[in-house]
Amino acid sequence: MARTLVVDQEACSGCGTCAAIAEDCFAVSDDTDKAYVVDQSACSEDEIQEAIDTCPEEAISWQE
């Protein structure tokens, strides 16, 4: 089963760290000021893991 990258919208503070690390995978919405996944296949597993590990709110995770 494939894993899906998710951002917990309630936990996200919109700091943009994930988008700075993996700019092809994440963006911050102008409407909600929250991060969201743009295209999880556009980044390497290492970039995604760095974004997960760096998120101050621990709002990014894999859903199986």
Image (spheres, rainbow, N blue to C red):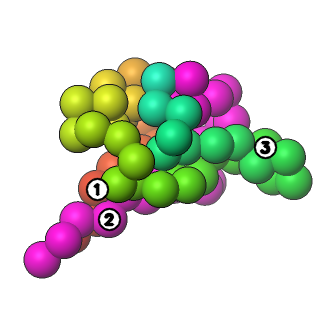
Q: Amino acid at mark 2?
A: Thr
Q: Which contiguous range is marked in magenta?
A: 1-20
Q: Amino acid at mark 1?
A: Trp
Of the numbered discs 2 and 1, the one sitting upstream in the chain is 2
**What secondary structure is the stretch in magenta mostly built from?**
loop
In the image, 54 versus 42, the foreground residue is 42
In what element is the residue under mark 1?
strand
Q: Residue at x 47, y 56 (%)?
A: 39
Q: Residue at x 66, y 27 (%)?
A: 15
- The image shows residue 59 at horizontal and vertical percentages of 47, 44
Q: Is residue 48 above or below residue 40?
A: above
Of the numbered discs 3 and 2, the one sitting upstream in the chain is 2
- The image shows residue 50 at horizontal and vertical percentages of 32, 26
Q: Is residue 32 above or below residue 26?
A: below
For the residues carrying marks 3 and 2, which lies nearer the camera in this image? 2
Left or right: 33 as drawn, with respect to 63: right
Of the numbered discs 1 and 3, the one sitting upstream in the chain is 3
Pointers 2 and 1 in contact (CB under 8 A)? yes
Q: Residue at x 23, y 40 (%)?
A: 45
- The residue wearing badge 1 is 62
Residue located farthest toward the left when viewing the structure as drawn: 1
Look at the image and say whether residue 11 sits in the magenta stretch. yes
The quadrant in which the C terminus is found is bottom left
Res. 4 mark: 2
> Mark 2 and mark 1: span between their CA atoms?
6 Å
- The image shows residue 56 at horizontal and vertical percentages of 49, 25
Left or right: 20 as drawn, with respect to 39: right
Res. 33 mark: 3
> Mark 3 and mark 2: span between their CA atoms?
22 Å
In what element is the residue under mark 3?
loop
Q: Residues within 10 Å of mark 3 (few under 14, many from 20)?
A: some
Q: Amino acid at mark 3?
A: Asp
